[in-house]
Image (tube, helix red, strand yellow):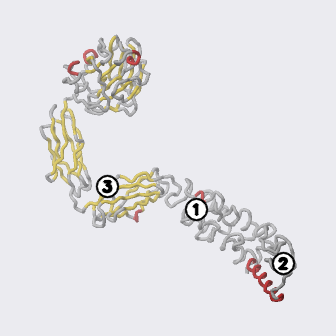
Amino acid sequence: MSWSSRHLLVPLSAVLLVLSACGGGDDKSPVCGNGIIESGEACDDGNRVEGDRCNNSCQVTTPTTDAGTNTDAGTETDAGTDQDAGTETDAGTEQDAGTETDAGTTTDAGTETDAGTATDAGTETDAGTTTDAGTVTDAGTETDAGTETDAGTETDAGTETDAGTETDAGTETDAGTETDAGTETDGGAIDAGTAPDAGTDAGTETDAGTSTDAGTTATLSALEPAAVFARSGTTGETIPESLSVTLSAEATTDVVVQVASSSPSVVVANNGQVTVPAGSRTAAVIVTADDAAGSAKATLTATLGGDSRTATVRVLGATEAASLAYLSPETVSLSSGQTANVTVTLDIPAAAATVVALSTTDNVGTVPATVTVPANEISAKFAFTAGASGSTGTIVATLNGQSVSAQAKVTAAPTTNHVVISEFAAAGPASGATGDNDEFVELYNPTNEEVNIGGWKLQYKKAVDGTYTGSYTLPTTARIAAHGFFLLARDTYQGTVTPDAKWGTGISMGAGGGHVRIGPNSLTASLTDPNVVDKLGWGTGDNGEGEAITSTPAKAGSFERKANAGSSAATMEGTGADAAKGNSYDTDVNSADFILRTTRNPQNKSSALEVP
């Protein structure tokens, strides 16, 4: 019988003895210390000594020097004897160190390192307190540290191979030793049982942590493509592309991503568990499709920790036929003899190799007689070769009596094969300093291909000067479309057309004369540089291209490059015949290539394309 049980039975027998002897009518005042339990006394052991479980007021107390201290547990008459703490039914009760199944093993309470010391189980800083191993079934609870269901279970700090295994917390050398949970190889990184333990640890960057963590910091970044297909009666990857989960970084150990389907028509293999192997970032989602099982379209949701991504899978009938969807691009513009790829796209992946018939109209060009879309693919490319200059027509694809088409136009070969300065103003219509600084430079691309002008330079020099002293570098993202424009302007520009880039105050032009030029980033400040792409000199300038433009426009006007040799100020402005034909005329003689506009007309990359 434990100490507390024996202690409660003794007072009860004494009370019965007194009542039987005295008839229950003794009205004398109780005397604490006479060895008799009287009215109001919970105990009377014949003395009034404090700290012996019956205090000097004859009330039951718990000694302050209990199991495990220097004067208590482990002495000859206390914890550690055959009848005291250390037996199977002792230390581990509600009043002793530990829980009901805790301290009380053969190597536990009663030794100098036992339960009850300042660092042992059951104390305020030990395993089992509110700051301990982190779960309700951890060290110090009813199923204490060291048992097979303790630290290391699925609800405990660490993974299945963590603290609490057969070689872990609770062995003969007790939790917290060199071989315990808390070593450098432990799942908690700092120990199971100390204040900063698995309750505040598991899941950190160095922890085994959760079932999907294992120490990595990778998160779920994508489930792509966003929409795919699966053919009924098949098991495998989706079509025409494989649906895959993607992590933010390479996994250091295998990472399991859970993928759920909204419809029984699409079942994810392996009970929805998609494993990204160590060293990889992606893994394919394998599905089984059955169009009779549920909705034909399923939403798949991939989840990893707090991250989730979705994609749709449409189930196709085993032999469901595809139809034509469209040709791309919708419009093809080429010079005579040039070739471009055109793509024919179906509405769903083809069940078998599908042959699509091709043709053109109005002698606009040539295409192959057919193009084949492979089985389980959704598109195929073919070549279109432009015919005679100036012709227009269509490219036609036909399948099972259905047709789709794209427009085709054959332009004249460009007379200029590089980006040019197309319009320019060194001053604006306003008077004074404001008008003088209302400056812009418009660029035009007369070629049939987009040109990357990112990092190019715009340079300026005074009318008579030895070097180009003003320079501006275009943004690295700058692009100019085929037959399109790009507008550069000073920060004090006042026009209504928004500039695509501003050069600030680094360039300040002279309305009466000067020079501007463009070229790649390798341009130097030298007057003669082979990297110059285009140059314009005006007014009193001494270094124009061929010959500078000697005259200057009115304040409201500008310099503009001609569309062709026959262009004039009348045909280039307003509704003139050449007003929308671009600015591709370049003989390398400024005075012959430009006209003076009476009203300036800057254009930017959002302006309509102008084909020569």
Disc 1 element: loop
Judge the density around disc 3: few (<14), some (14-19), many (≥20) Cα neighbours within 10 Å. Answer: many
Q: In this orientation, does residue 140 appear?
A: yes
Judge the density around disc 2: few (<14), some (14-19), many (≥20) Cα neighbours within 10 Å. Answer: some
Looking at numbered disc 2 in the image, what kind of residue is underneath it? Asp
Q: In terms of depth relative to the viewer, which is nearer, 549 or 339?
A: 549
**Sooner in the amino-acid sequence: mark 2 or mark 1:** 2
Q: Is residue 211 left or right of residue 267?
A: right
Q: Is residue 187 left or right of residue 399?
A: right
| Residue identifier under label 3 | 228
The residue furthest left is: 362
| Residue identifier under label 2 | 45
| Residue identifier under label 1 | 157
Q: In terms of depth relative to the viewer, which is nearer, 420 or 17?
A: 17
User: x%, y% of residue 352?
Assistant: 22, 57
Disc 2 element: loop
Q: Nearer the viewer, mark 3 or mark 2?
A: 2
User: x%, y% of residue 580?
Assistant: 22, 27
Q: Which mark is residue 402?
A: none
**Separation (CA) of disc 3 from disc 2:** 85 Å
Is 469 rendered above or below residue 268?
above
Q: Residue at x 35, y 58 (%)?
A: 299
**Separation (CA) of disc 2 from disc 1:** 48 Å
Is 291 rendered above or below residue 402?
below
Is 31 rendered above or below residue 569?
below
Looking at numbered disc 3 in the image, what kind of residue is underneath it? Val
